[in-house]
Image: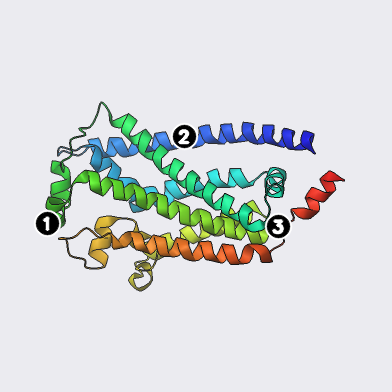
Amino acid sequence: MNKKICNNELIKAFYNKNITMLILILLSLYSLDLLFSTVENDLETNVYDLLMKITSFLPLSYIMIPMFLIVITVHFSVGDVQNYIAFRFKSKRQWYQMNVIFITQLAATFSLTVVGIMLLQSVFVFSFKNTWSEFALNYYENYAIFLSNYSPILYSIVTIILLWLILFLLGLIYFLIFLWTRKTMISFMAVFILNLLNISITLGKFDGLSRYLFTDHVNILQYIYRFNISQQQFPYSIVLYWILLIFIMYLIGLFTVNRVDILLEKESKNHVS
């Protein structure tokens, strides 16, 4: 058993390294594209104009979410290692909670990596002064009251938190489907289709449905507009949407993990024998 686990861990480490490098390259290239598109503006811009784009519809839907799904699929793709790890826990719930913690850390690492790439690429290009740029004041003129009351650093920090929250939620949904199916590709496709559904409803302008989905709850200014929130106060309620969904998904997993056959005990006994 130890030899097989060791071989699988070596394969997984090599596989993870190559996938990680590919993801970093793709994220870096896309970040450069966002940087160039920001620099092309005739008006003065700064680093916060770039960071504000992290949860914009196109970057989030077509780059961030698909890349994160690939990363999380890599982790759950080596079944034998997962079985070995699960065998070390006293109960399925402990194994479930360990994976929830891992997904939390993975979403945070992914989010901070994206931000880190953007900041590194912006060092010699943009100003880091904590003031709204000429471009932002002009482009978001309908939100002048909000911009005058709150700094771009605060806006950027909440934006990064929102990116982490949506990735964490999608990671939980991925893991719940994985619990039931034990198939990484089914989990990947299910969450990917969920993302496509959100894209389709948003592009189709089905306002009655879109107000309950992701798009209207990841961009702060879009959230203010869609829900007619006063610009005098920061809309921290946008975070509650994600916390509630994450809590619901966590409880569903916690109550169902003991009801599903995750095929750990049988495989572990076979290895021992």
Disc 2 and disc 3 in contact, CB within 8 angstroms:
no
The residue singled out by tag 2 in the image is 24
In which quadrant is the N terminus drawn? top right
Residue at the front extreme? 90
Q: Position of residue 172 (x, y in %)?
A: 52, 56
- Measured in 3D between alpha carbons, the distance from the residue under mark 2 to the one under mark 3, in whole angstroms, is 32 Å
Q: Can residue 58 be seen at all in this image of the molecule?
A: no
The residue closer to the viewer here, 244 or 191, is 244
Asked if residue 35 lies left or right of residue 147, the reply is: right
Q: Mark 3 points at which residue?
A: 262
Regarding mark 1 in the picture, which secondary structure is present there? helix
Q: In which quarter of the image is residue 39?
A: top left
Residue beneath disc 1: 145
The span from disc 1 to disc 2 (Cα, nearest Å) is 37 Å
Vertical comparison of 187 with 125: above or below: below
Q: Where is residue 20 in the image (x, y as percent from the top left)?
A: 53, 35
Q: What residue type is labelled 2?
A: Leu
Q: What element carries label 2?
A: helix
Q: Residue furthest right?
A: 273
Instruction: Give the image location of residue 158, x and y in percent.
Output: 30, 50
Up-down: is 204 above or below 119?
Answer: below
